[in-house]
Image (cartoon, helix red, strand yellow):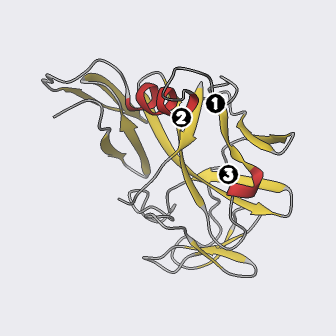
């Protein structure tokens, strides 16, 4: 296994569950009182998927910079859909957390790409989450989350709220502002 490919881990302890992507060959994930420790052998590069992707996105073939070198830069506002979502990943060390962006005019909202009913189920499995006039909808369970505040208005997790990821729009660009993470980028493809 190459550590350039993130490993998806879901850890459950009682009612708490955390889903993360790991960009390392060893470490631990804690949820409540439970700790999951792992170690795998890898003969791949020591670079993380984020480092490879960010370098590719920020340098042209001749090594010139294509855009600012802010690792918190996620996307241009115009790239964020109003009728779907954009999958992204926030990085904390060698640990990644998937999140989705949705736009209403020039305001961008971001939530962890995870249904509170079953956190291992992504709201956006690739190609965009289901977005209606008023809701983001879980494709698997039908839970409906109010656009904007992320409160579930119907479905198996009614009353629960999507985990918000803090972002900011400056000069037509979306930046990751959440202090839990040090960098972020767009994801491509599907699960």
Q: Which residue is mark 2?
A: 57
Q: Report helix, strand or loop for mark 2.
A: helix
User: Splitting the image into 4 quarters, where does residue 48 fall?
Assistant: top left
Q: Report helix, strand or loop for mark 3.
A: strand
User: Splitting the image into 4 quarters, where does residue 45 fall?
Assistant: top left
Cα separation, mark 2 vs mark 3, equals 22 Å
Rendered position, 35 above or below 102: above
Q: Which residue occupies the foreground of this view, 188 or 99?
A: 188
Name the residue: 75% across, 82% down. Answer: 133
Tell me residue 140's x, y (percent).
42, 76
Tell me residue 155's x, y (percent).
55, 79
Q: Nearer the viewer, mark 1 or mark 2?
A: 1
Q: Which residue occupies the foreground of this view, 110 or 36?
A: 110
Contact? badges 1 and 2 (CB < 8 Å): yes
Q: Which residue is mark 3?
A: 110
Of all residues, the one furthest to the front in this rendering is: 62
């Amino acid at each position: 296994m190459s550590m350039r490919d993130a490993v998806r881990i879901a850890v459950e302890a009682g009612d708490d569950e955390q889903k993360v992507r790991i960009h390392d060959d060893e470490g631990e994930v804690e949820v409540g009182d439970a700790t999951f420790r792992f170690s795998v052998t890898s003969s791949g590069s020591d670079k993380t998927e984020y480092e490879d992707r960010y370098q590719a996105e920020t340098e042209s073939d001749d090594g010139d910079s294509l855009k600012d070198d802010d690792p918190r830069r996620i996307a241009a506002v115009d790239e964020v859909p109003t009728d779907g979502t954009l999958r992204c990943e926030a990085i904390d060390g060698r640990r990644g957390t998937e999140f989705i962006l949705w736009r209403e005019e020039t305001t961008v909202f971001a939530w962890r790409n995870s249904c509170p009913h079953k956190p291992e189920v992504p709201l956006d499995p690739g190609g965009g989450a289901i977005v209606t006039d008023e809701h983001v909808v879980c494709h698997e369970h039908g839970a409906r989350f109010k656009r904007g505040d992320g409160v579930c208005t119907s479905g198996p997790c009614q009353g629960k709220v999507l985990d918000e990821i803090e972002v900011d729009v400056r000069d037509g660009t979306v930046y990751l502002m959440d202090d839990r993470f040090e960098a972020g980028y767009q994801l491509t493809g599907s699960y």
